Amino acid sequence: MIKNHLYYCLFILVITLSWSCASLDDVLNSSSLEEKEKLALKYYNEGDYETASMFFENILPYYRGLEKMEEFSYYNAMCSYNKGYYIVAAEQLKNFEKNFPHNENAQYAAYLSAYCYYLDSPKYYLDQESTHNAIPYLQKFTNKYPNSKYVEECNKLMSELREKIEKKAFENAKIYYSTKKYKAAVVALGTVLNDYPGNKFTSEIYYYRAKSAYELAVKSIESKKKKRFIDLDTACKLFIKHSDKENKNYSKWMEEISDIHYKAIEYITLN
């Protein structure tokens, strides 16, 4: 009985949705331009951006060269933004600012376009192509509108994106340490330091670089040991020089590195 009732409810839902879609198609195909314009604005103001965008896409070709083209182009772009179609919205907002530079929403559209690229940036452990692409758009906005109220926010967003790229690079390099490929770890961690000087993870990078240099030295064949212990001595000194005392791991790391630094000095002295 209950099963039959569920099937009946599902049947009614499918019929209702089909009727709604058919009704919407009928309105889009048969209503007057004025009526579709009213419906587009109605759905937009009600927050039904999916339906509103269907109407805006339908009527926009009829307004080319007319005053309402500006208004409806903006609303259509905002529909894409509110639906979460960020790359589509970014292009639409960018075109809006380009085509209507004197519109009161032009600057906001330019900012929101750049912000859409920021929103498209994934978590740090995923591919960061979108992150790399987002930074120039935000920078372009700050260059074009240096006095805009959105400049401070753009600078914060760029810092966040750069930090994400730096973290990705660091975590990739740290994998070599985790997998005991210490020679590769020393090189990769050094590359991160060169590519991103002064980054947020500097202390931790120097820590893992010193730890990698130690493991590489003690596991080396005799003919390579002295040079690698000298390299370890340098790595330890760099950690001590660049370590951040405010880091919660500072004391623990300093104790570890001081211990292996002592071993490096002892080996160099005796050999």
Image (cartoon, grey):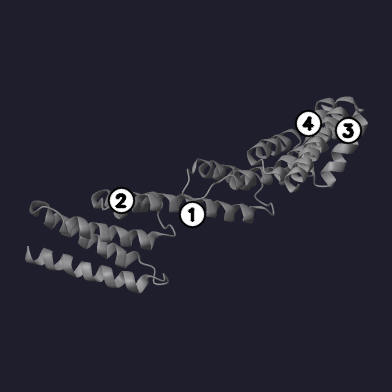
Q: Which of the two labelled residues, at mark 3 and mark 4, occupies the earlier sequence position?
A: 3
- x and y percentages locating residue 68 in the rendered image: 86, 34
Q: Badge 2: how crowded within 10 Å, few (<14), some, or many (20+)?
A: some
Residue at left offset 30%, top offset 50%: 176
Nearer the viewer's eye, disc 2 or disc 1?
2
Per the image, the residue denoted by label 3 is: 36
Residue 118 falls left or right of residue 95: left
Q: Are marks 2 and 3 in contact (CB under 8 Å)?
A: no
Q: What's the amino acid at mark 1? A: Glu
Label whose residue precedes the other's in the sequence (2 or 1): 1
Could you give the CA–CA distance between mark 1 and mark 3, rounded to whole angstroms?
Answer: 46 Å
Q: Alpha-carbon distance for marks 2 and 4? A: 51 Å
Left or right side of 74 for 191: left
Which residue has dot 1 on it?
163
Residue 100 on image: x %, y %: 76, 36
Q: Is label 1 in a helix, a strand or a loop?
A: helix
Q: Earlier in the sequence, mark 4 or mark 1?
A: 4
- Please name the residue that numbered disc 4 is placed on: 57
The first of marks 2 and 4 along the sequence is: 4
Circle nearer the N terminus (2, 3): 3
Circle 4 residues within 10 Å: few <14, some 14–19, many ≥20: few
Label of residue 124 in the image: none
Number of numbered markers: 4
Q: Nearer the viewer, residue 40 or 111?
A: 40
Secondary structure beneath dot 4 equals helix
SS at circle 3: helix
In the rendered view, tell whether residue 126 sits above or below residue 39.
below
Residue type, numbered disc 2: Tyr
* Residue 188 visible, this angle: yes
Residue occupied by mark 2: 176
Nearest the eye: 270 or 177: 177
Number of residues whose C-alpha sits closer than 10 Å to that of mark 1, classed few (under 14), some (14–19) or many (20 or more): some
